[in-house]
Image (tube, rainbow, N blue to C red):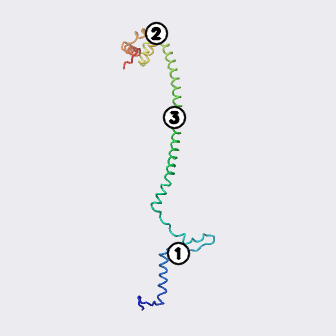
Amino acid sequence: MTDPFSAKPNPRTAAPALTVCALVAVLFAGGPARTEEAVRQVLPGGQAPVAPQQLAKEKAPDESEIQRFCSNIADAARDRRYALQAQELKELQAGIDQRMKALEEKRAEYEQWLKRREVFLARAEDGVVKIYAGMKPDAAAERLAMVNVDLAAAILMKLDSRKAGVILNEMDQKAAAALTGIMASAARRVDPS
C-alpha cells in the first residue's frame, strides 16, 4: 500500500481519482446542464440543443429594479383604473337614464289616469246630484242615511239649499246632525287644524 501523503502518486490509483475529481468539478461548476449535454439526443426534425451559455440561470431582480418597474407602470395603471371607472360610471348613468325614462312614462300614465278619474267623478257627481234632486225627500233621506257620510254631505252641498233642507228634515236626527257638522266644516274658509 502506498502512503497517501507521499510525493509520488501511484499510477493505478491516480487515474480513477482524477476521473472522480473531474466528475465533481463538472457537477459543481456546470451542474445538470453540462451533464445533460452528454445524455440528450436530438430527434430528427427536433429542436437543436441549447448552448450551455443560454442555460445559465438569470439573476433575481433586486429591489431597485422592482421599484423602478412599479413606478414606470404606475401612471399607466392609474389611467387604466380611471378608464374602467369612467366606463362603469357611463354604464350606471345609462341604467339610471333608462329607469328615469320608465318613471316618466309611468308618471305620465298616472297623470292621464287621474285626469280621466277626475272627469268621471265630476260627471258621476253631477249625475248623482241630479238623481237625488229628482227623488222625493223622504226616499232621498232614507238612501243618503245608508251612504258614506262624506259622500252624503257632498251630495247635499251640491243640491239646491231648499231641497237639501227638506231631505235633512226627513232624516234621523243623529244622521242629520252628523251631515250638518261635516257640511259646516267643509264650508269654512279657514282650515280648522
Mark 3 or mark 2, which is nearer to you?
3
Numbered mark located on residue 91 in the image: none
Across and down, in percent, residue 51 comes to 56, 72
Q: Amino acid at mark 1?
A: Arg
Mark 2 residue crowding within 10 angstroms, few (<14) / some (14–19) / many (20+): few
Q: Which is nearer the eye, 74 or 52?
A: 74
Q: Which is nearer the eye, 167 or 3?
A: 3
Q: Which residue is mark 1?
A: 34
Q: Is residue 72 shown left or right of residue 150?
A: right
Instruction: Tell me whether circle 1 and circle 3 mark residues in contact (CB < 8 Å).
Output: no
| Residue in the image at 48% along x and 75% along y | 29
Q: Amino acid at mark 2?
A: Asp
Numbered mark located on residue 160 in the image: 2
| Residue in the image at 50% along x and 24% along y | 114
Sequence-wise, the earlier of marks 3 and 2 is: 3
Q: Is residue 35 shown left or right of residue 153?
A: right
Across and down, in percent, residue 96 comes to 51, 37
Q: Which residue is mark 3?
A: 100
Q: Amino acid at mark 3?
A: Met
| Residue in the image at 49% along x and 52% along y | 74
Sequence-wise, the earlier of marks 1 and 2 is: 1
Q: Which is nearer the eye, 77 or 27?
A: 77
Q: Is residue 89 shown left or right of residue 168?
A: right
Which element is circle 1 on?
Answer: helix
